[in-house]
Image (cartoon, coloured by chain):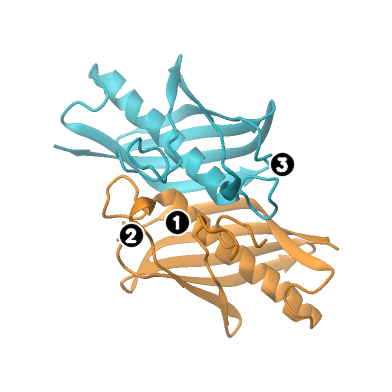
Chain colours: A cyan, B orange
Amino acid sequence: MHHCHGCGAANEKGLRLKSFWDGDEAIAQWRAEPHHCGGTQENLNGGIIASLIDCHSLNLAIANAYRSAGRPIGSAPRIGYVTANLNVSYLKPTPLQEVIALRARIRKLEGRKAWVDCTLSAAGVVRATGEVLGVRVEWE
Amino acid sequence: MHHCHGCGAANEKGLRLKSFWDGDEAIAQWRAEPHHCGGTQENLNGGIIASLIDCHSLNLAIANAYRSAGRPIGSAPRIGYVTANLNVSYLKPTPLQEVIALRARIRKLEGRKAWVDCTLSAAGVVRATGEVLGVRVEWE
């Protein structure tokens, strides 16, 4: 996970998204670089938005699994989630120069599956919403 | 569009995806770099997969709009498509070192909207499928 293009701290060319607890939800703030633009140079790329929503949502699912087990994040056996489905609705353009704010909430847990809802905002306005279905995996 | 993180030829830090006609469908081939990995260093990141499907699908919608108008791609007034919804299902892990093959097909056109279906394959196996809803925009 340390090398993940979206949220790996060790990936120098990645997005390096960091997620934090806020009650039972997860929040994150992120700043784009100029090369993260989309169809115009003023707006954030839709694929980057999808990446941020994907990683932030699964970060919450993973952190929640550790918390439910009463274990520190990253302790063995490692818990991960892989994305089965990612559905992003783009509501408004996302200005590249604003701070990007993410908020994720677990909608449902069932067996190994987690359904997470996520919003992506900039300048106080929700720009995109996402639904992520993650499937839990464990490894030593 | 030249600077788009997914498919802009002028974006040196972008993915630089190039799409081509294959009959009425669009095809593309793309190679990942090591920093495009996901939860493991062997597999392609899900956000990158979403980016590739998004850009490739809208590239087809744009090219199709120009072709239907009998005009060269990029001629004025410029035609673009912006993503309204992106839905990606991840079927199998996508090995990072394989050539990534994309194929997109227009499912429906209605007014300014285009629904595009896309598959992403590696080593001859479909790894992810996407549905993209794009909305047409024009500018001088």
**Mark 1, secondary structure of its residue:** helix
Q: Is residue A140 above or below residue A88?
A: above
Q: Are marks 2 and 1 in contact (CB under 8 Å)?
A: yes
Residue A37 lies, in percent from the top left, at: 62, 49
Residue A68 lies, in percent from the top left, at: 29, 20
**Mark 2, secondary structure of its residue:** loop
Give the amino acid at mark 1. Answer: Ile
Q: Pointer 2: what residue? A: B94
Q: Pointer 3: what residue? A: A92
Number of marks in the rendered image: 3
Can residue B99 be seen here? yes
Q: Is residue B108 above or below residue B137?
A: below
Residue A54 lies, in percent from the top left, at: 46, 41
Residue under the image location 41 percent in, 50 percent down: B46
Give the amino acid at mark 2. Answer: Thr
**Mark 3, secondary structure of its residue:** loop
**Marks 1 & 3 on one chain:** no
Q: Are marks 1 and 3 in contact (CB under 8 Å)?
A: no
Alpha-carbon span between mark 2 and mark 3: 31 Å
Alpha-carbon span between mark 2 and mark 1: 9 Å
Residue under the image location 16 percent in, 29 percent down: A76
Q: Pointer 1: what residue? A: B49
Q: Are marks 2 and 3 in contact (CB under 8 Å)?
A: no
Give the crowd class for mark 1: few <14, some 14-19, many >=20 residues within 10 Å.
many
**Marks 2 & 3 on one chain:** no
**Which of the labelled discs sits on residue A34, or is there none?**
none
